[in-house]
Image (spheres, rainbow, N blue to C red):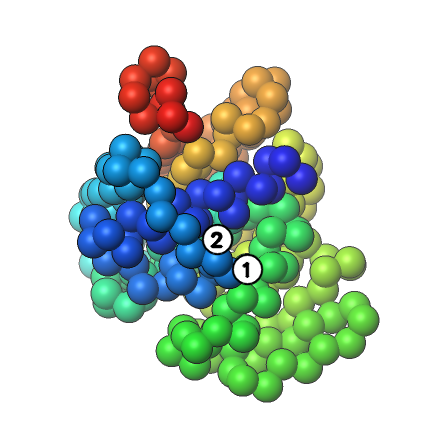
Amino acid sequence: MQVQNTNDSSIVSKLSAANKGYFLDQWLKMFVDKEQKRSPIINRGYYIRFKAIEALFQSWFNEVPVSIYPKSQIISLGAGFDSSYFRLKKLNVFPPGCKYIEIDYRDVLKRKIEYIAKSEFSHLLNICNKQVERNSNILYLPCSLQHSTQCSVSWKQRSRLLSSDEYVMLGVDLQNCKELETCFCDLEIDFNIPTLFLSECALTYINLKSSNNLIQWVQAHFLNSAFVLYEQVHDDDGFSLVM
């Protein structure tokens, strides 16, 4: 739970920086119940983080053009409430034929979907409509992403919390590579197409053995891939000391 709570703190900090005009991301506010102002050094730190990830996506799209690679995928490890997919779609820079897969704890992604479903942005995101059917085990979200028909969500029985042709949420513990592989096979993930793995302040929260196992698993299964890690590596600078 303590690790999951870092997601809530992070999204508030991101929104604080966006509200101050450091960058534009209108999707962040749908994930925040109570906005808070952060200190200037935190706002600047998240600005650098935002620009680094923005540059990463641009570089990846340039290196993997649709004309050469009609299919590709981005796998966000420990995605939390990150809004990158929605922002890229809004900017019309998300390439056709690319699949965006978010992986995090089930409870985190369950909350994320609930925020999207009840937000003012739900109809704009084309992920779920205003009518959400619920029962004790399954939440059904009618989807219209690309040529998708319907996404089914089961909190208790399945790791695949949301699935469409383009956007997927998997509730899997990153320390469990076996379950991760099972989910990928179930999704018919292509292990051979260009794949970007993104870990944005995520692997630092799991133990060294598990993080090494995960990186080795990626290396063994995705031969045409890039693994990008964004973490605090200088623990003695001003931003890290405040964090």
Amino acid under label 1? Lys
* Front one among 94 and 190: 94
Residue topped by disc 1? 112
Residue 81's tag is 2
With 238 as the anchor, is 172 left or right in this view?
A: right
Q: Image quadrant for the N terminus?
A: top right
Say above or below: 53 vs 187.
above
- Of all residues shown, which one is farthest toward the bottom? 131
Q: Residue at x 48, y 53 (%)?
A: 81
Helix, strand or loop at disc 1?
Answer: helix
Q: Image quadrant for the C terminus?
A: top left
Residue 114: tell me if it is visible: yes
Q: Which residue is drawn at 42% across and 56% down?
A: 35
Helix, strand or loop at disc 2?
Answer: loop
Say above or below: 221 vs 172.
above
Amino acid under label 2? Phe
Image quarter of residue 163:
bottom right
Q: Distance between the residues labelled 1 and 2?
A: 6 Å
Q: Residues within 10 Å of mark 2 (few under 14, many from 20)?
A: many
Residue 190 x, y percent position in the rendering:
48, 50
Q: How crowded is mark 1: few (under 14 residues within 10 Å), some or many (20 or more)?
A: some
* Front one among 24 and 100: 24
Mark with earlier residue (1, 2):
2
Residue 31 x, y percent position in the rendering:
47, 60
Whether the residues at callouts 1 and 2 have beta carbons within 8 Å, the answer is: yes
Please tell me how many numbered marks the rendered image carries.
2
Q: Which residue is drawn at 60% across and 21% down?
A: 207
Image quarter of residue 186:
bottom right
